[in-house]
Amino acid sequence: MEKLRIRGGRPLHGHVPISGAKNASLPMLAATLLTSDPVQISNVPRLRDVHTMLAVLQSLGADASFCGEAEVSVQADNINNLKAPYDLVKTMRASFLVLGPLLARFQFVEVSLPGGCAIGTRPIDQHLKALAALGATIELKEGYVTAEIDGRLRGSLIDMDIATVTGTQNALMAATLADGDSTIVNAAREPEIVALANMLNDMGADVEGAGTDVIHVRGKEALHGCTVTLMPDRIEAGTFLIAGAATRGCITINGGCHDLLDAPIAKLRQTGVEVTVDGDYIHLDTHGEQPRAVDIRTATYPGIPTDLQAQFLALNCVAKGTSRVIETIFENRFMHVPELARLGATIESDGTTATTVGVPQLYGANIMATDLRASSCLVIGGLVASGETVVDRVYHLDRGYEHIEEKLTAVGADIQRIDE
Ligand code: EPZ
């Protein structure tokens, strides 16, 4: 099992390049199923989740692979299987994003229920409600969802009870090939939905309103191929900014997603660090000072993303003062709390709130990652702690952070991947 060994206590200094956005790449790869034409996506990170989604597309019969360092090409002109298998879907919930495109193009799809994960039960009722609104007959049997319709999906009002990101994406992709117009109400507003909508429009779809809570779609009979560049990963960028603040360093993020990070940047400024934006660069400087603890309440976009909650918590553990961090999106997203306590943090949590009392110092220990963003929080803990920290189960980290030890080493961290 691979682990990361970190000798902490070193401020991060330097430039960090940001990779393409994992949570934009996955729906956009699923969207390639909407056409038989070739689709090229550039700036794609070589992440475990991307490789899993490529494997899912291949299992359906699509030609899908990296054709360059960060370029992916997909052609779904020979789909010979409409069943997304459990063994792939269980490894990555986002595989469920093939549901909408396959149903819309082939009028039938069978996808394994994704099941829950470490951070919550992760239901998919809203995904199914949206497809039913478009006329599909939905059946749940033996751990699989089957959706089918005679003829094309029918444009409709889709009223989401929850602003779900991938639920909105499944509904949006399905509606692009429906007969007639659809309106998605209470749509999620995340930038990754805007990125998907822009790609769909490049494929000949007619989507308006993405990024707001009401999205209008005029259905088309077919979509064509496109060539698209993936947006930068705002969560990776936020993670490195928080790491720079926690280590009392001075780092610059190269990646052009400052406009997607207004809330996290404002929150970082509340800690007392200096954050300036210059074109595609975000510059954070702590001037070597200990940051102040900040209260956090996660929210849907444009609020503080739940995917940065664990990282801010790590910062608060070594900041001046106390903090309350309220997680409003997922019901079990504090499994990093006991691991931070093992590093010497004064921290506790109940189901929805974690509280910290900042300490001047953490101390290296053996700790274990439990999910993707918890693992990045524990890396930040190790970077701050004096002595040696070994983070176990880093396969979680590899799902969402490309070349993380190289990027951290380049800004002064003492970090190695070890295989025990
Ligand atoms: C997306 O997950 C992201 N994943 C998550 O990132 C992110 O944390 C989440 O959005 C929230 O921003 C991808 O984009 C691949 P939701 P998603 O549906 O779409 C409830 C990471 O670390 N809900 O917006 O699965 C659900 O239980 C990952 O990169 C229903 O009740 O999240 C949750 O409480 C983790 N019924 C809330 O909505 C549904 O049908 C928001 O979940 C769907 C969701």
Image (spheres, grey):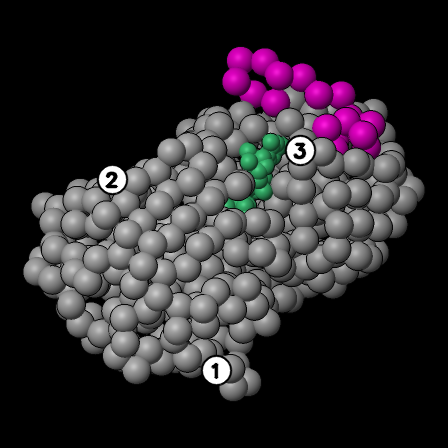
Q: Is residue 146 above or below residue 207?
A: above
Residue 276 - label: 1
Q: Amino acid at mark 1?
A: Thr
Side of 132 relative to 297 (left or right): right
Q: Secondary structure at mark 1?
A: strand
Residue 227, position as x, y percentages in the image: 64, 66
> Distance between the Cα atoms at labels 1 and 2?
34 Å
Q: Secondary structure at mark 2?
A: helix
> Which of marks 3 and 2 precedes in the sequence?
3
> Distance between the Cα atoms at labels 2 and 3?
33 Å
Residues at discs 1 and 3 in contact (Cβ within 8 Å): no
> Distance between the Cα atoms at labels 1 and 3?
39 Å
**Image: magenta residue range:** 129-145
Asked if residue 142 lies in the magenta stretch, the reply is yes
Q: Residue visible at 63% across and 66% down?
A: 228
* Residue 192 can be seen in this image: no
Name the mark nearer the viewer: 1 or 3: 1
Q: Quadrant of residue 210?
A: bottom right
Q: Amino acid at mark 3?
A: His
Residue at numbered disc 3: 127
Side of 420 relative to 80 (left or right): left
Residue 338 - label: 2
Q: Secondary structure at mark 3?
A: helix
- Residue at the right extreme of this rendering: 180
Residue 207 - label: none
Q: Is mark 3 within 8 Å of ligand 1?
A: yes
Residues at discs 2 and 3 in contact (Cβ within 8 Å): no
Q: Is residue 31 above or below residue 123?
A: below
> Which of marks 2 and 1 precedes in the sequence?
1
Taking the image in four quarters, ligand 1 sits in the one at top right
